[in-house]
Amino acid sequence: VAVKVENIKPHVGARIHAKPEDLLDPAVVQQCLEALEDRAVLVFPQINLTNDQQLAFTDALGSRVNFTNSSATGDLDAKDVYTVTLDPKLNPDPEAVHGTYFWHMDGLISDIVQPKASLLSARVLSAKGGQTEFASTYAAYEALPEEDKAELEGLVAEHSLYGIYRHIVEAPSDDDMTRWTRRSSRKHLIVKTQPSGRKSLIIGMSADRVEGLSVYEGRALVARLNDWAAQPDFTYRHHWSVGDLVVWDNCGALHRVIPYAKDSGRKMHRTSVAGVAPNLQAAA
Ligand SMILES: [Fe+2]
């Protein structure tokens, strides 16, 4: 059985109406993989997957990877499922979640290949805020003027914890700075070429420097690219219902959440699909 894939906006997003058992069919998985790169964001309205079903779909799309080794493990009934929440009882270290208020890609500063995709399912919603926005960096790249594409080719950005936390903490302590620099930065080509040959931008708020440019030139370039990708034509805002599953191409989409309160109860379950090829071909 093939499932129906319905475009959400001309340049980004698709809605897939499927039942949990459909996702066990290899033909449907293949259809989802193709739609994922084509549309960058896939919405499965109220599919209501259990943790085990979400993990099985994660494995079917590639293989699961768990790169978040701290915080938010409170009520897990499945390993490799990360609970995204600001509830202080479940997440004693909310700073990482505050970072999700800004455009980013998952896993760019972890010791792993950038995850291929992320899957997020809604368990408890916030009364206010909590919508997730996505920006297709395939569409953003493809719409760039040719001269900009040529200038970006081969450029390498450094992503770091400092890049993230400078947006969140007003006056970092010495301890903060030690913590943020303990993990060295990670380098990623700004223009990623997918195995299919299609290109996307690897950008977001974690990019703090660009190799070969001054600090201010690098930050200006990243800011300009982030702004470019955030144009309405390339973005989709998801208003969640409980049970929705959203899968995004983590090498071809930025995402961020509209701020919500820490006592809102909001709880999301995230799993990740391992990346296949490092994005550092030109950085050696
Ligand atoms: Fe994220």
Image (cartoon, rainbow, N blue to C red):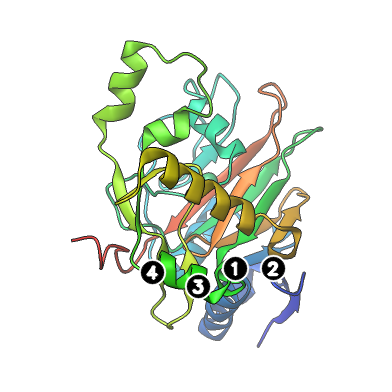
Helix, strand or loop at disc 3? Answer: helix
* Residue type at tag 2: Gly
Q: Nearer the viewer, residue 216 or 92?
A: 216
Pinpoint residue 273: horizontal percent, then vertical percent: 43, 61
The residue shown at (33%, 68%) is 276
Q: Disc 4 and disc 1: Cα gap in Å?
A: 21 Å
Q: Earlier in the sequence, mark 2 or mark 3?
A: 2
The residue shown at (58%, 82%) is 31
Position of the C terminus, as image quadrant, is bottom left
Q: Earlier in the sequence, mark 1 or mark 3?
A: 1
Helix, strand or loop at disc 4? Answer: loop
* Residue type at tag 4: Glu
| Residue that mark 1 sits on | 40
| Residue that mark 3 sits on | 147
Q: Earlier in the sequence, mark 3 or mark 4?
A: 3
* Residue type at tag 1: Ala
Which dot, 3 or 4, sits closer to the camera?
3
Residue 152 — which label?
Answer: none
Q: Earlier in the sequence, mark 4 or mark 1?
A: 1
The residue shown at (60%, 66%) is 140
Name the side, left or right, on which 195 lies relative to 123.
left
| Residue that mark 2 sits on | 13
Q: Residues within 10 Å of mark 2 (few under 14, many from 20)?
A: many
Residue 153 — which label?
Answer: 4
CB atoms at circles 1 and 2 under 8 Å apart? yes
Does residue 261 lie above or below 139 as drawn?
A: above
